[in-house]
């Protein structure tokens, strides 16, 4: 028998209390869901008061339309009253006008994830990946950019867990991988799955033109098998997360704005969408008075009110933290993506979540959460905040090119082609190389597909 002994070791553990969990939730919520969250808190907490909540006599669609038409007042970075609107002190009017609740993709996945038996590292990796998924259920950023060094060791197990959840096909790079994951989930055998993968990644352009024989040659299937697989494909969804996006959510309210005014870039926070909350002073007085009472019922009332006041103060602090973090991210974007705000998508520079996290002194996952389902209004339109983050592309001339900027170059090359001949992906790759940008033919093909542009054969 081996001797029994004691061994000491040091470990760093982070325990999240309820308030910290709620704070993380606040970071991720888009405006419509945050409105619902505040509405619920106002209904349950009598000590919370709406100081200047917007009047909601019209429908949400009408409110959004009115809100987007309101002229913004110029502000400094510290001002909190941007995007002016008609304000009211009516608590009830705010409650009655808030948006109806709908489960988000992230909520749907997190609920299922909680039912799985996973080790701590795998669970944290899975939660981080979920926080970075876009509305389609795809990665907003390369997975290795959002996972810390420690969590990367759990990447494969985390993806395996996520691919077992509903809806099938989430946590994918694009619609092709999503369709392939859905086919695996539907139980296709190995040989059929191989043919299906070739169909999704290579043969779709041929199938769109009803060229079954040509597609079958690529796939290694006869015409009947090709038709059967193509028919099966139509039962799948290329964007599995889309069913969690309602028509109301498709009406976008920008969370912040960065635009040129009088020769300079101005940052504004869209705060008027949310009510200004405070703790009702009468309830504070009541809680203090009841504390001094000898009556049991009044002491119990005092304890209840103090608990509600504490809960309300936590909500107010979390909303301010959410706003402050979002504003800090916006401030970094003004400086790091100045070219984008002045000249458009073609001038987008490489910028990672970790870059911004380092500048504002938070973890990269915090930046991922605060930019999830958030939108920014610019002189070139409204963009998902996460679209302003992009990794670098190899180049030989010392200039920084983001993937987004290279995609815009691909678009520009195709649209401005006046040779009378359709440019092949290889030709576009060669033209980019002449500009000092290393972009393989397959990468050009991928970017072109993401831009919704057909191949030279189809064009």
Image: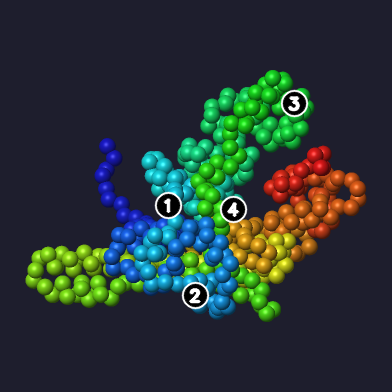
Identify which residue is drawn at 57% across, 73% down: 72
Q: Which residue is mark 3?
A: 212
Colour scheme: rainbow
Q: Earlier in the sequence, mark 4 or mark 2?
A: 2
Q: CA distance from mark 1 to mark 4?
A: 28 Å
2 or 1: tag closer to the N-terminus = 2
Distance of label 3 from label 4 (alpha carbons)? 35 Å
Disc 4 to disc 2, how far (Cα)?
Answer: 32 Å
Question: Which badge, 3 or 2, comes first in the chain's sequence?
Answer: 2
**Mark identifier at residue 81:** 2
Query: Quadrant of residue 409 in the image?
Result: bottom right
Categorize mark 1 by other alpha carbons within 10 Å: few (<14), some (14-19), many (20+): few
Residue at 53 percent across and 32 percent down: it is: 185
Number of marks drawn: 4
Residue 293 in the image: state x and y as whole percent.
11, 73
Q: Residues within 10 Å of mark 2 (few under 14, many from 20)?
A: some
Observer-side mark, 4 or 2, equals: 2
Is 354 left, or right, of 341 in this rendering? Answer: left
Dot 3: within a 10 Å radius of its alpha carbon, few (fewer than 14), some, or many (20 or more) residues? many
Query: Where residue 430 is drawn, which disc sits there?
Result: none
- Would you name the residue on which mark 4 appears? 141
Location of residue 363 with respect to 231 vertically, above or below? below
Whichever of labels 3 and 4 marks the residue nearer the N terminus, that label is 4
Instruction: Of the two numbered discs 1 and 4 on the same chain, state the one appearing first in sequence.
Output: 1
Badges 3 and 1: C-beta atoms under 8 Å apart? Answer: no
Real-space CA distance between mark 3 and mark 2, rounded to the nearest whole angstrom: 60 Å
């Amino acid at each position: 028998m081996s001797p029994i002994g004691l061994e000491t070791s040091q470990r760093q553990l982070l325990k999240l209390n309820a308030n910290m969990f709620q704070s993380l939730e606040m970071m991720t919520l888009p405006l419509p869901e945050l409105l619902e969250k505040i509405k619920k808190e106002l209904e349950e907490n009598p000590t919370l008061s709406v100081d200047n909540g917007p009047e909601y006599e019209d429908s949400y669609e009408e409110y959004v339309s009115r809100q987007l038409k309101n002229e913004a007042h110029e502000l400094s970075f510290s001002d909190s009253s941007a995007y002016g609107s008609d304000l009211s002190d009516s608590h009830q009017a705010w409650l009655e006008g808030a948006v109806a609740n709908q489960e988000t993709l992230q909520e749907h996945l997190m609920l299922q994830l909680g039912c799985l038996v996973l080790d701590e590292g795998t669970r944290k990796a899975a939660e981080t990946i979920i926080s970075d998924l876009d509305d389609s259920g795809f990665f907003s950023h390369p997975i290795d950019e959002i996972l810390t060094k420690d969590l990367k060791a759990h990447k494969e197990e985390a993806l395996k867990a996520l691919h077992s959840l509903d809806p099938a096909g989430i946590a994918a790079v694009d619609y092709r991988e999503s369709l392939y994951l859905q086919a695996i989930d539907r139980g296709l055998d190995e040989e059929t799955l191989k043919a299906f993968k070739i169909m999704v990644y290579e043969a779709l352009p041929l199938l769109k033109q009803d060229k079954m024989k040509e597609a079958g040659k690529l796939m290694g299937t006869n015409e009947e098998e090709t038709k059967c697989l193509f028919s099966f494909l139509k039962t799948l969804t290329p964007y599995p997360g889309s069913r969690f996006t309602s028509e109301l959510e498709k009406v976008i309210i920008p969370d912040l704005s960065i635009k040129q005014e009088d020769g300079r870039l101005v940052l504004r926070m869209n705060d008027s969408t949310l009510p200004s909350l405070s703790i009702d002073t009468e309830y504070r007085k009541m809680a203090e008075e009841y504390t001094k009472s000898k009556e049991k019922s009044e002491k119990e009332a005092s304890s209840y009110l103090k608990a509600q006041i504490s809960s309300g103060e936590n909500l107010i602090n979390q909303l301010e933290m959410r706003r402050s973090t979002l504003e800090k991210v916006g401030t970094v974007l003004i400086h790091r993506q100045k070219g984008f705000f002045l000249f458009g998508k073609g001038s987008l520079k490489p910028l990672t979540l970790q870059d911004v996290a380092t500048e504002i002194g938070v973890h990269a996952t915090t930046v991922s959460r605060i930019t999830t389902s958030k939108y920014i209004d610019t002189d070139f339109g409204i963009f998902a905040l996460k679209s302003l983050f992009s990794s670098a592309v190899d180049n030989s001339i010392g200039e920084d090119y983001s993937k987004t900027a290279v995609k815009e170059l691909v678009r520009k090359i195709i649209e401005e082609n006046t040779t009378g001949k359709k440019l092949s992906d290889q030709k576009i790759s060669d033209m980019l190389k002449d500009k000092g940008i290393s972009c393989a033919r397959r990468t050009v093909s991928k970017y072109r597909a993401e831009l919704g542009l057909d191949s030279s054969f189809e064009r």
